[in-house]
Image: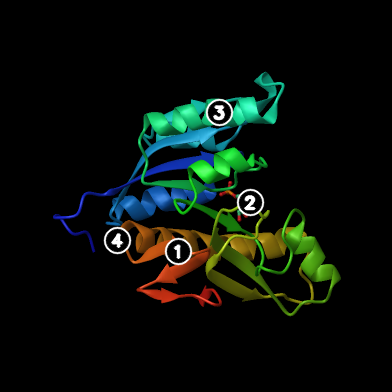
Amino acid sequence: MSDESVPPCRLVVLISGRGSNMLALADACEAGLPATIEAVISNEPDAAGIPVATQRGLRTEVVPHRDYAERADFDAALAERIDHYAPDLVVMAGFMRIVTSGFIARYLGRMLNIHPSLLPAYPGLHTHAKAIADGRKRHGATVHFVTDTLDGGPLVANVSVEVKPDDDADTLAARVLTREHELFPQAIGWYATGRLSMQAGLAVLDNKPLDSPIAL
Ligand code: GRF
């Protein structure tokens, strides 16, 4: 899978919590995805993903958002730490902060997020509970480029699972999460190999603008 002639894609991974997507990405990099995790950065000092990443031999940093009175000041501090690693791609893997438009503009076209719903359905929080309450038959997760619209940037790819009659938000989230761990490395792999980009506000895969996400 890895091509020795192409330098690996440098990633900075942003997390706020347990970091299972970050770990799946680390596994994929070890298995030959042509990318390197240069750093894992959390806004939450107590994020469970930080010790997990450290044990994994990854460089970690915490930029606590509560230390900054203004959102823009936190974003500037975060950007300073991200840029230190000169990433090709910024990966939001369970990063639970709303960032300013200046921050988004700085990484436009080189920042991907994973969101636990079949976007454009259910942007925002509590997606699994909402899907169950609405009687949805299927739910899932979507990778998209990050733009100014919350969970609304150009859609790249998604995975979907059946919503079972006895599901609650936790069982459904767990089933979706397993598939997230395949979805995110796949999409990041496309970016790392130059197959995926954002152009004129659309995700473009293999020179084709995507009018809907690739279903994996
Ligand atoms: C995932 O469900 C992801 O889709 C969402 O936040 C959760 C993060 O989980 N954005 P983890 O920290 O990667 O385990």
Residue furthest toward the left? Answer: 5
Does residue 165 appear anywhere in the picture? Answer: yes
Write down the residue under mark 3: 76
Q: Secondary structure under badge 3?
A: helix
Give the label, 3 or 4, closer to the camera.
Answer: 3
The image's colour scheme reads rainbow
User: What separation in Å lies between label 1 and label 4 (alpha carbons)?
Assistant: 16 Å
Amino acid type, mark 1? Gln
The CA distance from mark 2 to mark 3 is 17 Å
Q: Residue lying at the far bottom in this picture: please name it.
A: 137
Q: Label 3 is placed on what type of residue?
A: Ala
Which one is in front, 29 or 81? 81
Instruction: Give the number of the disc on residue 199.
Output: 1
Instruction: Name above or below for residue 165 compared with residue 187.
Output: below
Asked whether the viewer can see residue 45, the reply is: no
Q: Give the numbered dot on residue 148.
A: 2
Name the side, left or right, on which 212 lies relative to 168. left
Image: 182 above or below 54: below
Towards the viewer: 77 or 199 = 199
Q: Amino acid at mark 2?
A: Asp
Q: Residues within 10 Å of mark 2 (few under 14, many from 20)?
A: some
Foreground label between 3 and 1:
1
Circles 1 and 4: CB distance less than 8 Å? no
Picture coordinates of residue 176, whole percent (x, y): 61, 65
Q: Earlier in the sequence, mark 3 or mark 4?
A: 3
Amino acid at circle 4: Thr
Residue 25 x, y percent position in the rendering = 42, 51
Tag 4 or tag 1, which sits nearer the N-term?
Answer: 4
In this picture, residue 153 sits left or right of residue 121: left
Q: Which mark is residue 193?
A: 4
